[in-house]
Amino acid sequence: MASNSGNAKKQAFVGTFVHSKKLDELEYLHDTVVCVDPSGKIVAVERECDAKKAEQILFAKLGWDAADVQVHVCKEGQFFFPGFIDTHIHASQYPNVGIFGKSTLLDWLNTYTFPMEASLSSLSKARRVYTRCIRRTLAHGTTTAAYYATISVPSTSLLADLCLSLGQRAFVGRVCMDRLGPSYYLDESPEAALSATKASIEHIRSIDPNYDLITPILTPRFAPSCTADTMKRLGALQAETGLPVQTHISENVNEITLVRDLFPDSEHYAGVYDDCGLLTPKTILSHAIHLSEDEAELITARGSKVAHCPCSNSAITSGEARVRWLLDKGIGVGLGTDMSGGYSPSILEAARLACLVSRHLAMGDGKGGAADAATMMVQQVSAEERERAKLSVEEVLYLATKGGAAVVGLEGKVGGFEVGMEWDAQLVGLGVVGEVAEGKGVDQVEGEDEGNVDLFGWESWEDRVAKWLFNGDDRNTKRVWVRGRLVHSRV
Amino acid sequence: MASNSGNAKKQAFVGTFVHSKKLDELEYLHDTVVCVDPSGKIVAVERECDAKKAEQILFAKLGWDAADVQVHVCKEGQFFFPGFIDTHIHASQYPNVGIFGKSTLLDWLNTYTFPMEASLSSLSKARRVYTRCIRRTLAHGTTTAAYYATISVPSTSLLADLCLSLGQRAFVGRVCMDRLGPSYYLDESPEAALSATKASIEHIRSIDPNYDLITPILTPRFAPSCTADTMKRLGALQAETGLPVQTHISENVNEITLVRDLFPDSEHYAGVYDDCGLLTPKTILSHAIHLSEDEAELITARGSKVAHCPCSNSAITSGEARVRWLLDKGIGVGLGTDMSGGYSPSILEAARLACLVSRHLAMGDGKGGAADAATMMVQQVSAEERERAKLSVEEVLYLATKGGAAVVGLEGKVGGFEVGMEWDAQLVGLGVVGEVAEGKGVDQVEGEDEGNVDLFGWESWEDRVAKWLFNGDDRNTKRVWVRGRLVHSRV
């Protein structure tokens, strides 16, 4: 399967590489060469090297003939950065981005979301929507996405096909929901939900047998829209297959009340999933805004992960997730666009908004303004703790890459530049402001639109990365690769 | 002065016009023709009209010869929108956008701001920075900006010159500060501050005698960095000249404490300005986050206005300004980028973030998380009141245009499409997603980069505007005019 087998060429990338060393530290590898084999795997990361040295020494060490190697040298000021991981995105809601009014979760679902998702049973419409969504997110540097499709199996299969052919690494989930949705958009029974899920898994296995690029993901929408029966069957399927799971948790206070009413026997929202065998080390829990201490401890014990979706959480007034608190508990956190609860397709914007939301936490009571859902008690938080809530540039970029990789179970495989990892990367270029002669209004080299980042030349590398984070957009993402394959290019 | 005299041609704009009718209502004028005379003034707004009808009937009514009229017809799906008003922007801090780390106001000023501003006494550096800032904001549709320059008169004069020549309507303020700045960046005395201010006014009068495009604005930086003597002299100058004033108020809790210590005889922060004669109907107060009820009442009584700067307020952790509360008090509110406290040059992004910040208020205690600065008491706010805090798409676009116009004293002159107003406008175009044939990954018409707004064709006009607000950027601003003059074009 050519589209699934990487670039099928030996490649060497030359220049500056920036990636997360740890949560609060970016590593800047200048004058470095990264060699990628035809399967898309990084086989060398050579410091103090350039194209010439690579040709003279490095390729030989790898047993490569220089004539067989495609060499990519980044221009002055450009750098390679790991591809972004979107840990939570509804491909099927893409056409609704920006359309949410003043709604909150439960009315938003009924007004905007269910009708749109249901309409994608039309495969020509689904093709149009999914193609645009994949191409758009690739253009923003998203090399891996954990997708919710719809309840339709053919539509979900189409999403998997399109990810494979366009080259985006993806987890593709057929949505399970057998209650509390509109009558026109529901699984008929737990059996029907399960058999549709299995059909979706089978399709993905048929197009990508080793899940090299596309992996099925079990997707109970969220507890309010799934019966315990359905969730228990999915839990058993998880235990049997080892497949990942994705769902929502503790996004909105009314939703939490609803879950308490629907599952009176479970200790709390996290407990509902745990009781169904869905709280696993391979489970991605989106939002996790209003968790209690008990819930966080349970999640830590089970090793489940969290997809933080700041754009969505602010837009539909869900709350301010306490990322520092989650990290302190030892819970892995990544970023999600959560389109179309979130309006932006960009994980760079999610990172930017994660910074802002953390500052809103620091400005408030440190509890996201929301009372502890379990106790409805607002706790006073010290000024020091509030200050600690703030996330730095380095931290949000970690969440966008290495943190996200761990959330989707790809730690050590993507999210950084190390030997043995796969080449899921983006080439970033920023705009340079020229000198202005007196009497002239022109200060920019003519040519490509370089976007809104303006470098004056005196910025440190840390400043450049900060400028990219805060004003960068898809114009700065010049090229994108997944498993060594070039999947997007502006140049 | 050609550059200051509009387009010097008769023009007719044909198509769809969208502008604010009132705070919470946008008006959509389809099939409309707007005629603009050579001075840049709107002389006709004709409904149910097109280019042909205009030529046959409308031009004759105006006494125009069709041969003399330049006709601009917007393409299917495009629309004209009033130019944005940036009510608070530091041109001199432009190179620092995105660079603020975890700082808050007072350390941010010393670490990043004062050194950059001081360095712009170099006119070649100032030319480069200001040119880029003006061109960048024009490209984002900002037709009017209330600028802070630096304490240097020549550098401030250069900013005025550049605005005039590049065609941006501007208020240009030479910054006054005679204490609490670094020794290398301070006015030597109140007399020196005043005489430099007057020199700056004189320069602007010499290049634009009637202040048609460029208006000087009195600019005491903020109370902590000005002696009462300097502020009183500026207050007297305001009374004498009738010129507008801009300053900061109540941005940060430590700043408020500092003001209380520095001005023990004034009742509160707003009282300090009032005691100096600076709280006038022509005063723009930036931020106004932590105002007390008393201060708000005083500001209402004096008729001063507020520049809301959500990007800055979130980025440097200042607080969440209560826009609804200000509006309820009858205080005029506009939007400011506040670069580089804010990182974005875009008023569209400021509008977007105003939406989000209002939702953070709704999620919190409705007081912006901050205690009332005067009483340090957190008041409980009802759920209904919190819900009311949310700003709609229509409301933030009002703040960005008509609201901003009133803040800078240009109500009735810019910010909408009415006869007698001036043609300060932008042409907005959004991307259209094509059909995708099976087996093809291409879904976009080749050609210009249309940005991140994807229209599928079924969206209402309200949806289109919401999509523009949330995912639009400078790529969607195709053309920009000020006083009838085309000052930016992507096509």
Image (cartoon, coloured by chain):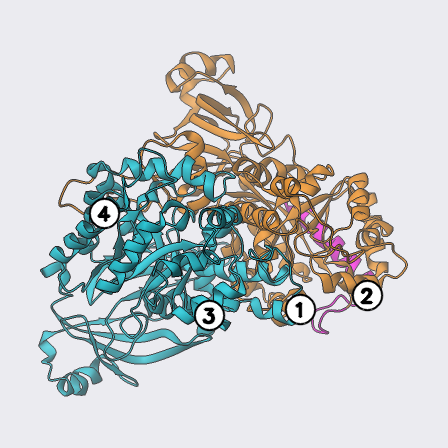
Chain colours: A cyan, B orange
Q: In which quarter of the image is the C terminus of chain A?
A: bottom left
For label 2, the residue is: B189
Q: Provide the major secondary structure of the magenta segment.
A: helix
For label 1, the residue is: A383
* Tag nearer the camera, 2 or 3: 3
Kind of residue indicated by mark 2 = Ser
For label 3, the residue is: A395
- Residue A246, image x, y percentages: 34, 57
Q: Nearer the viewer, residue A221 or B386?
A: A221
State whether discs 3 and 1 lie on one chain: yes
Residue drawn 70% across the image and 42% down it: B326
Q: Nearer the viewer, residue A240 or A137?
A: A240
* A169 versus A35 height, above or below: above
For label 4, the residue is: A156
Kind of residue indicated by mark 4 = Thr
Q: What stretch is highlighted in magenta?
A: B180-207
What mark, if any, has residue A333 been given in the picture?
Answer: none
Quadrant for residue A359, please give it.
bottom right
Q: Residues within 10 Å of mark 1 (few under 14, many from 20)?
A: some
